[in-house]
Image (cartoon, rainbow, N blue to C red):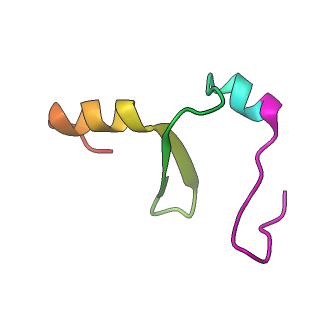
């Protein structure tokens, strides 16, 4: 994968399918202290925040 000139990144459909993500699903990206980028379903992240859990 390559970060494009317009700062976008295309993820393979197979990777998204393995994660259980579907086309049109809203996700959020967070970076961890150790330099990882993590995608989360937006609904899951909101549920965690409302429950008092960290992202």
Name the side, left or right, on which 33 lies relative to 45: right
Q: Quadrant of the N terminus?
A: bottom right
Residue at image point 69% right, 72% down: 7
Residue at image point 35% right, 38% down: 45
Residue at image point 15% right, 37% down: 52
Name the side, left or right, on which 54 lies relative to 4: left
Q: Quadrant of the C terminus?
A: top left
* Picture layout, residue 47 above or below residue 55: above
Indicate the position of residue 11 as horizontal and vertical percent values.
Answer: 76, 46
Indicate the position of residue 41 as horizontal and vertical percent values.
Answer: 47, 34
User: Which range of residues does the magenta coloring cover?
Assistant: 1-14
Predominant secondary structure in magenta? Answer: loop
Front residue of 9/34: it is 9
Name the side, left or right, on which 5 lies relative to 54: right
Front residue of 51/11: it is 11
Q: Quadrant of residue 24?
A: top right
Residue at image point 57% right, 55% down: 37
Indicate the position of residue 20 as horizontal and vertical percent values.
Answer: 62, 22
**Residue 5 lies in the magenta stretch:** yes
């Amino acid at each position: 994968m390559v970060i494009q000139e317009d700062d976008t990144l295309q993820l393979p459909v197979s990777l998204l399918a393995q994660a259980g993500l579907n086309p049109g699903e809203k996700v959020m990206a967070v970076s961890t202290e150790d330099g990882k980028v993590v995608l989360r379903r937006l609904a899951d992240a909101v549920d965690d925040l409302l429950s008092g859990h960290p992202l």
